[in-house]
């Protein structure tokens, strides 16, 4: 089943609870939280205190995408704040295997993220221990960027590896997922679809979730086109 993970990066941060609830009414089944530290990426967003507040605003799993240096230092704080899924960047982790274990030990689902310039093959040895792989389809740091089509090959490659090695990790995609790209992303094999600008950009949160999900389900063969 494809799932939509609205990214609050493009929401009104003064009204996050309303934004998250509208996304949930529209069919979003995860809330994607972009954590940026101004070092790994050239932008700063939110951390555990905001996750703690979001935890009170929704029962949906909080899918925290850490775009930070040294994520190990904050993993206990995210767990305590109520995060459910934690993804860390391959490019930011000196000891990725240890970091993924640490996330799991804290009762959260571990995931790895790769930037557009990072090859899928580098993940081979840790694929059995991740809940999902997040493929960045833009360079991380900002919402509203244009989808990079060459990243579709990474999604296809991951799907092949999952089959070949009989694994069951899920494939998430993040960046530029919108009405004009979502079908291609789903057809390539992604089943967790992050969308920021396409959900929150124009304020029609509920309708945007519905129409993105509809397009995704048609592309996945879960629905007939109308
Ligand atoms: C970018 C973030 C994304 C971002 C996607 O670094 O990781 O989650 O919110 O935004 P859109 O969907 O607008 O490209
Ligand atoms: Zn993200």
Image (spheres, grey):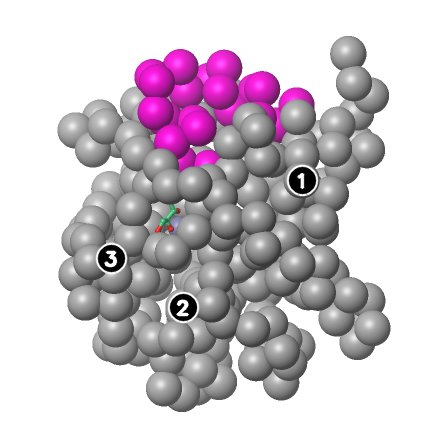
155 displayed left or right of 208: right
Front residue of this view, candidates 220 and 120: 120
Badge 3 marks a residue whose secondary structure is: strand
Magenta residues span: 195-214
The overriding secondary structure of the stretch rendered in magenta is helix
The part of the image, by quadrant, that contains residue 8 is: top left
> Which-is-in-front pick, marks 1 and 3?
1
218 is higher (above) or lower (below) than 128: above
Quadrant of residue 146 within the rendered picture: top left
The tag on residue 184 is: 1
Instruction: For the residues labelled 1 and 3, say whether their Cβ atoms are less than 8 Å apart.
Output: no
Looking at marks 1 and 3 on the same chain, the residue that comes earlier in the sequence is marked by 3
x and y percent of residue 174 in the render? Answer: 48, 48
- To which residue does mark 2 refer? 88
- The answer to which of marks 2 and 1 sits earlier in the sequence is 2
Question: Which of the image's four quarters has the C terminus?
Answer: top right
Q: Let me know if residue 196 appears in the view.
A: yes
């Amino acid at each position: 089943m494809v799932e939509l993970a609205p990214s609050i990066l493009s929401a009104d941060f003064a009204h996050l609870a309303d934004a998250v609830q509208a996304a949930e009414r529209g069919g979003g089944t995860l809330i994607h939280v972009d954590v940026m530290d101004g070092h790994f990426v050239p932008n700063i967003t939110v951390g555990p205190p905001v996750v703690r507040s979001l935890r009170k605003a929704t029962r949906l799993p909080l899918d925290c995408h850490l775009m930070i240096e040294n994520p190990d230092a904050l993993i206990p704080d995210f767990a305590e704040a109520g995060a459910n899924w934690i993804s860390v960047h391959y490019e930011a982790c000196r000891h990725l295997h240890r970091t993924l274990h640490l996330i799991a030990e804290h009762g959260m689902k571990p995931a790895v993220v790769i930037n557009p310039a990072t090859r899928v093959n580098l993940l081979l040895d840790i694929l059995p221990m991740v809940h999902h792989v997040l493929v960045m389809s833009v360079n991380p740091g900002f919402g509203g960027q244009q989808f990079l089509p060459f990243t579709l090959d990474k999604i296809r490659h991951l799907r092949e590896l999952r089959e070949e090695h009989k694994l069951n990790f899920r494939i998430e995609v993040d960046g530029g997922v919108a009405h004009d790209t979502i079908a291609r992303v789903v057809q390539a094999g992604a089943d967790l679809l992050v969308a920021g600008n396409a959900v929150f950009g124009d304020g029609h949160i509920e309708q945007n979730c519905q129409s993105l999900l509809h397009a995704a389900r048609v592309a996945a063969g879960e629905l007939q086109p109308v």
